[in-house]
Image (cartoon, grey):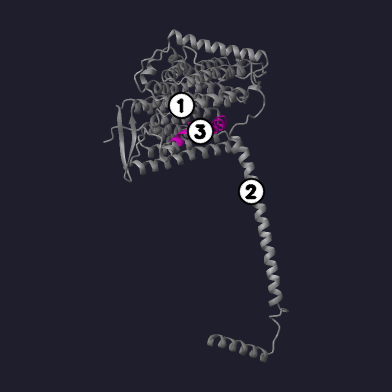
Amino acid sequence: MIDFIPPFLAYIAGALLIPFLPKGHGRSAALCIVPVVGAALMWPLPMGSYGQIGVMGLELTLLRIDKLSIIFGVIFSLAAFLAMLYAWHIRDTIQQSAALLYSGSAIGAVFCGDLISLFFFWEGTAIASVFLIWARGTTGAYFTGMRYLVVQVASGVILIAGAGLFYTETGSITFDRMQLGSLATWLIFLAFGIKCAFPLLHNWLQDAYPAATVTGTVVLSAFTTKLAVYALARSFPGTELLIYIGAIMTLFPIFYAVIENDLRRVLAYSLNNQLGFMVVGVGIGTELALNGTAAHAFAHILYKALLFMSVGAVLFRTGTAKGSELGGLYKTMPLTMIFCLVGAASISAFPLFSGFVSKALILSAAGKAEYHIVWAILLFASAGVFHHSGIKIPYFAFFAHDSGLRPKEAPWNMLLAMGLTAFVCIAIGCYPHPLYALLPYEVKYDPYTATHVINQLQLLMFSALAFTVLMRAGLYPPELKSVNLDTDWLYRRAGPAVFARVAQAVSGGWGGTTDFVRRCCDVMVAILYRAHGPDGRIARVRPTGAMVIWIAILLLAVMLVSFM
């Protein structure tokens, strides 16, 4: 008798049934129901492991319920519901099925208890999510999707290689705490790092997310990278290397985000920056730090989705997300503007908004663990976040100058999804205790101390003052129609150029070699022709008697040699 149903099965069943439902509001309602069913399957189960299945001598665990998996399962379910609501107007069966399979794979990965099951869900997220990019229907989206797929599948291949070596070394495939020190664990660490967009491995994120559809980008922002954060928190908590990787992640995207013109790419860089805070929390590894990582992942999924929703609504109505082509939209899209401001306040960690109560845990953990330089880096990164996401996004989209665009307000379903997301961001910021109750460890922390509130307000006000001064002085990087070079230039431009040069050199060398060999063969043929051709010396007619004499002479020579 089966006493449980894994939540991911609800998503798979939904994806299989969706194509048979008539397009319209009924199908859209069914899409929104699937995450609710998945959450209902997850919530009542007590802590423990379920669904152990023996396959080829290996024990797979389909469902492991603990506090770490629960909080990620809850936020993934909530994000899936909000994304489906935001995409209510979509009538594309491929996008709808892909979104369900993508969400279900991420939730399956969160609840699985072994590395083999993780691999299948890991690759499931890669294969399903790429269709959200290809659904854009442009040539650029096709090639972007191919690059994205190569990177994501490569991450899975590295993961399964690491899992195989890990089994060889330990005899176990359990997906749990590990220590760096062997090739197996380094491979697994690298696989997680690719999906988490570690420095130099990050450009698939900025390349792919802005290339997806308006609704697809919202779905993409919620799952892939946060699944990687979960995997790191599950497997490598307390790994000090992650502290420094995370610190770098918080820093370098700030400068790209400030000069970027495409607002969805700004948000992609901002996403990379926020991941750095979570990675630092995993690296510190204390209970407070891991609570901060889980809480920040929860809050980040919501406010980042809200920002992508608002910019997506602008793109949906105007056809562009370029800061240089926008401005003045507050006149005709006031609700979208308000929701964007809520997302901006949340990511900037204003008091009474969700980012304030989650980021505080990580900063406090860094201070208590005496990583003072890292704490200062995180503080600087927090000020940078306010610049590029808290101010730049709403300012250039809605206020900077009058672009002359007068689009209609976003559709009702987009507004409803943004409204619900904004409400949760504010509710968490005002009353964080329900979120804290979901965290992996007991929380003994009050974010609303006078010192913390005053320090954060000072940081934000001075950051706003710096933005104002730079804008007034004409020193702030203007929104220009340009392309920023990042490390993706290595595989998008430099790599193909080098390959073309190498191919040209190899082709030239091969051509020269074959020409030389052909000339040598021609010379040999000519020599042989002179000897054996119709007029050659060998082919001349000789008298039979002369040939007999020569044979006799050769025979005599052989006999003399044999007798000597």
In this rendering, would 395 be left or right of 35? right
- Mark 1 and mark 2 lie on one chain; the one further toward the N terminus is 1
Give yes or no for contact between labels 2 and 3 (Cβ–Cβ under 8 Å).
Answer: no
Q: Is residue 169 visible?
A: yes
Label 1, label 2: how far apart the Cα atoms are: 42 Å
Chief SS of the magenta region:
helix
- Give the crowd class for mark 3: few <14, some 14-19, many >=20 residues within 10 Å: many
**Bounds of the magenta segment:** 189-212
Identify the residue position indicated by label 2 in the image. 503
Task: Name the residue located 53 percent from the left edge and 28 percent from the top edge.
Answer: 217
Magenta residue check for 209 = yes
Placement of 238 over or under 395, stated as above or below: below
* Foreground tag (1 vs 2): 1
Measured as percent of width and height from the top left, residue 149 is found at: 52, 38
Label 2, label 3: how far apart the Cα atoms are: 39 Å
Label 3, label 1: how far apart the Cα atoms are: 37 Å
Magenta residue check for 182 = no
SS under mark 1 = helix
Type of amino acid at the residue the image marks with label 2:
Ala
SS under mark 2 = helix
* Foreground tag (2 vs 3): 2
Extreme-top residue of the structure:
450
Identify the residue position indicated by label 1 in the image. 243
* Foreground tag (3 vs 1): 1
- Mark 2 and mark 3 lie on one chain; the one further toward the N terminus is 3
Give yes or no for contact between labels 3 and 1 (Cβ–Cβ under 8 Å).
Answer: no
Identify the residue position indicated by label 3 in the image. 95
